[in-house]
Image (spheres, rainbow, N blue to C red):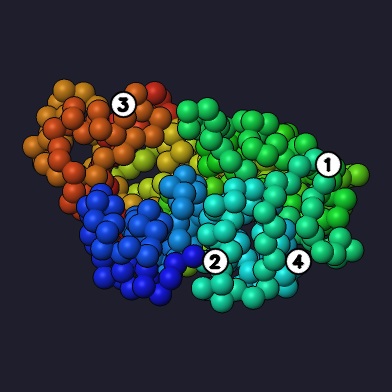
Amino acid sequence: MLSKESIEFIRDHASDDPVKLLLSSKKVPHSDMKLIVSAIEGRKKIAAKVPEWGERFDLCYPSSVSLEQCSSAFTAEFKQYLFKQKNVLDITGGLGVDSYYISKVAKSLVYFERNKELFDAVKYNFGRLEVVNTMFVNTEVNESNIPGVPDLEKVYTVYADPSRRGPSDSRIFNPEDYEPNMNKLMDLLLGFAERIIIKVSPMADITSLIKSFTAVCEIIIVSVFNECKEILVIIDRKNRLSPVPLEKVKIQAANFEKSEKKWKIFEWSLSEESSSGAVISTPEKGNYMYEPNSGLLKGGAFKILCNRYSIGKISLSSHLYISKIQIPDFPGRSFRIEEIYDFDKKGIKEIGLKFPKANVSTRNFNLTPPELKERLGVKDGGEIFLFGTLFSDNSRKIVVCTKAG
């Protein structure tokens, strides 16, 4: 799609203003300046998500929406273990980030995309990236057929990242409103696929997800640097006739740790959570306090942490945890309590004077972090962490912490 001259132009003008480039299209009379500018703009946007692609000047990015919705290299690489040595159908190919990383570990991959412009760009890009085990099909998969698959006698794994955008580009959270509606495709897909892996919004409710689909065997909450990025619903054909009960479905919270540069995984089930007991502990100066990773909070792993790590909770709904001896492998942030203040006029005044700079958070508190920061009169930064929270006696407290080593 991009000629040698166009690639050189992109390399030479990678930092230029796209609007000015469009106005100066006469400088490249034999090239499609619109395509060149979209490649320059796309390269800037993709660099943060997929650095490997951002380093190149020979790839096309025709759609800004596909750039916004595509996976990052972190999450795409994490998903690779689900597709090792599998024959894979990516039925919602999009910009092809997931397809690209899946192709590195899969036996074979069939990429489906209904949008012709996007399809052509991805097929061209994969050629530049020297992907050799992928077949491209420019069509929409629907509940009546899946055209273009060369050998339906093979055992397949299906991957789908349905669109979660509605009219006027509004966000959609109900899986029944995704495009395509995966439930309508289920009979067709499970006819030849042993597994279906569906990427859904990180805002989706876990229990509702399990109820929304048949034969769910696992839910994976994927976070990067403690920010929840996506949820994977794993559907297994063998569970169709004898479904795993909702409370027995395996839930994983996977987080890529920034400091250790590796994935950490915490696994549980709803039944294990419901059968666990929460020990309520009143924090004291010198105690250690823990804030779970976002994936655990998203998945509702609250009481189970007390059992797994022999720690207490500040209150039933606060989701901050306490121990006298430091827990070295807790899945989240660890702090040491330096002071505890009542959230009253006296406490607010003392905190403002003593800690002019701090990192402010709230758990089960009637103010948001920005609101609490304003009330306390502190600025962002420093090595002090202030947590506004509710103790078990319903008293409002500010817990002053430093990070535990």
For marks 4 and 2, the one nearer the N-term is: 4
Would residue 395 be seen by someone viewing this image from the given angle? no
Circle 3 residue: 367
Can you give x and y, in whole percent of width and height, for residue 126 in the image? 56, 68
Q: Under tag 2, what secondary structure? A: helix
The three-letter amino acid code for the residue at tag 4 is: Asn
For marks 4 and 3, the one nearer the N-term is: 4
The three-letter amino acid code for the residue at tag 1 is: Ser
Circle 2 residue: 124
Of the residues tagged 4 and 3, which is closer to the observer?
A: 4
Query: Label for residue 144?
Result: 1
> Which quadrant would residue 364 be assigned to in this image?
top left
The three-letter amino acid code for the residue at tag 3 is: Leu
Residue at image coords 46%, 53%: 62
Can you give x and y, in whole percent of width and height, for residue 117 in the image? 54, 52
Of the residues tagged 4 and 2, which is closer to the observer?
A: 2
Residue at image coords 62%, 66%: 102
Residue at image coords 42%, 41%: 320
Q: Residues within 10 Å of mark 3 (few under 14, many from 20)?
A: some
Q: 321 or 148, which lies in front?
A: 148
Q: Residues within 10 Å of mark 2 (few under 14, many from 20)?
A: some
Q: Are marks 4 and 1 in contact (CB under 8 Å)?
A: no
For marks 1 and 3, the one nearer the N-term is: 1
The residue most toward the left is 353
Q: Looking at the image, is 200 positioned above or below residue 110?
A: above
Q: 402 or 369, which lies in front?
A: 369
Q: Residues within 10 Å of mark 1 (few under 14, many from 20)?
A: few
Q: 367 or 283, which lies in front?
A: 367
Q: Looking at the image, is 9 positioned above or below residue 234?
A: below
Can you give x and y, in whole percent of width and height, for residue 129 in the image? 52, 73
